[in-house]
Image: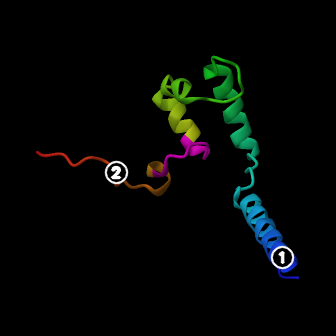
Amino acid sequence: MKKLFVAAIGLLCVTAIVVQAQDAKPPKKELTPEQQVVMKEMLAKYDANKDGKLDKEERAKMTKEDKAKMDKAGLTKNKEHHHGGASTNAPATDK
């Protein structure tokens, strides 16, 4: 009887962990029509390997204007521009 009880508790724990792990993954955010237009334009211009994504090297080749356009459309992870402040991770400069 004890073995059955321990097995049932173990099964419940494993099930809870699996369900929690599935819930931890954030849902994919849908792009607005404006974001879709900007992203399509940037992919056509900079997606050198044609994988449908802009990797680090491709983003590095973008002009400042195009980076600003993506930031304005909300397509970057750069919080510096969205909040209007400087990054707190910037090194201090001595003058």
Please name whichever residue, 65 or 58, is drawn nearer the observer in this view of the structure. Answer: 58
Element under disc 2 = loop
- The relative height of residue 84 versus residue 33 in the rendered view (above or below) is below
Residue to which mark 2 is pinned: 89
Element under disc 1 = helix
Residue to which mark 1 is pinned: 3
- The relative height of residue 42 versus residue 31 in the rendered view (above or below) is above
Question: In this rendering, which labeled residue sits more in front, label 2 or label 1?
Answer: 1
Q: Position of residue 4 (x, y in %)?
A: 87, 76
Q: Position of residue 42 (x, y in %)?
A: 64, 28
On the picture, is 62 further left or further right than 32?
left
Give the residues drawn in magenta, as a range. Answer: 71-79
Q: In this view, which residue lies farthest toward the left?
A: 95
Q: Are marks 2 and 1 in contact (CB under 8 Å)?
A: no
Residue depicted at x 56% and y 43%: 76
- The relative height of residue 41 versus residue 85 in the rendered view (above or below) is above
Is 43 contained in the magenta span?
no
Position of the C terminus, as image quadrant, is top left
Number of numbered markers: 2
Q: Quadrant of residue 73?
A: top right
Position of the N terminus, as image quadrant, is bottom right
Disc 1 residue crowd, few under 14, some 14–19, many 20+, Cα 10 Å: few
Residue depicted at x 84% and y 80%: 5
Q: Position of residue 91 (x, y in %)?
A: 26, 46
Q: Quadrant of residue 16?
A: bottom right
Q: CA distance from mark 2 to mark 1?
A: 54 Å
